[in-house]
Amino acid sequence: MKQVCIIIPVKDEETGVKFLFQDYQKCIMAKKYDMSFIFVIDARTSDTSREVSAKFGQLIIDQSDTHGKGAAIKEALNSWNKNKTEFVIFMDADGSYSFSDVYKIIKSLEKGADVASGSRFLSNKLDPKEMGGLHFFGNRVLSKIASIKNRRKISDLCTGLWGFSSHSLSVINIKSSGFDLEAEITGRCSKLNLKHHEVPVNWNARKGGVSKLRSFRDGFIILIRILRT
């Protein structure tokens, strides 16, 4: 069986993680792959996210010295580097992506992609109202800028579902600490000439909680990352 590690940063997402646990129990991946999980729980979390995450029975990292999505991913990768798997998935904790979509990402990697990401805009099922007007518009604009800058079309820069081969993740060498993570990955894929495939996914509105993304401030940080990477 091929080994797959799924990394999930969490901050106040108990409802989303409960959905993920129930969804995982119904999926077929556990029979097809050697699955493992790393949850990174922000120390500022005020709900039962940590306890719910522990139901997966996997590694739980308490993120106390750093803050931000990118920083959480880097903490998880410190653990992953000690026991590398063939494939790695980055997945949002809010329940907006399902494990059926994770399976699509893995299949894309098996077919030869170095990096695969889930695009909400390729499925033709996205309701802009569910995403929020500013987030929808901002993502479309940033995706366009990233496409021009990297000379590669990307339809969904800010997707919360990514997959990597072990080699590609090692050479990308993530540096970002916040929501500019995806912009850095996209830019590094272009510079390193990695095969990046976008996969249509069936995205749904988050399950409880509130978005941590601040449209204007984080949007500006993402823009700077696009231009500098």
Image: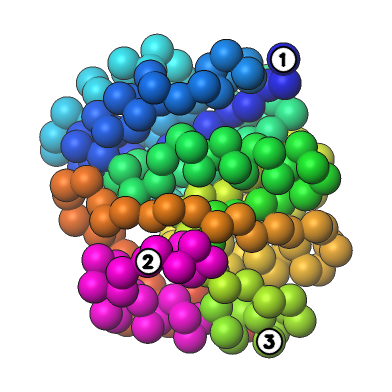
Determine the residue positioned at 77% across, 68% down.
190
How many angstroms separate mark 3 from mark 2 (CA)?
24 Å
**Mark 3 touches mark 1? (CB < 8 Å):** no
Work out whether mark 3 precedes mark 2 in sequence or the reverse, and give the earlier one.
Answer: 2
Of the numbered discs in the image, which one, if any, rests on residue 148? 3
Residue 95 lies, in percent from the top left, at: 31, 43
Q: What residue span does the magenta drawing correspond to?
A: 120-142
Observer-nearest residue: 205 or 83? Answer: 205
Q: Which amino acid does the dot numbered 1 rest on?
A: Met
- Tell us which disc is closer to us: 1 or 2: 2
Mark 1, residues whose alpha carbon is within 10 Å: few (<14), some, or many (≥20)?
few
Residue 50 lies, in percent from the top left, at: 26, 26
Q: Which amino acid does the dot numbered 2 rest on?
A: Leu
Q: Which amino acid does the dot numbered 3 rest on?
A: Ile
**Mark 1 touches mark 2? (CB < 8 Å):** no
Mark 3, residues whose alpha carbon is within 10 Å: few (<14), some, or many (≥20)?
few
Residue 8 against residue 175 in the figure, above or below: above
Left or right: residue 101 compared with residue 192: left
Left or right: residue 218 compared with residue 169: left
Element type where label 2 sits in the image: loop
Indicate the quadrant containing the N terminus: top left, top right, bottom left or bottom right.
Answer: top right
Residue 179 lies, in percent from the top left, at: 44, 62
Indicate the quadrant containing the C terminus: top left, top right, bottom left or bottom right.
Answer: bottom right
Element type where label 3 sits in the image: helix
Residue 30 against residue 145 in the figure, above or below: above
Q: Quadrant of residue 65?
A: top left
How many angstroms separate mark 3 from mark 1 (CA)?
39 Å
Work out whether mark 3 precedes mark 1 in sequence or the reverse, and give the earlier one.
Answer: 1
Which residue is the site of mark 2? 126
Which residue is the site of mark 1? 1
How many angstroms separate mark 1 from mark 2 (CA)?
34 Å
- Tell us which disc is closer to us: 3 or 2: 2
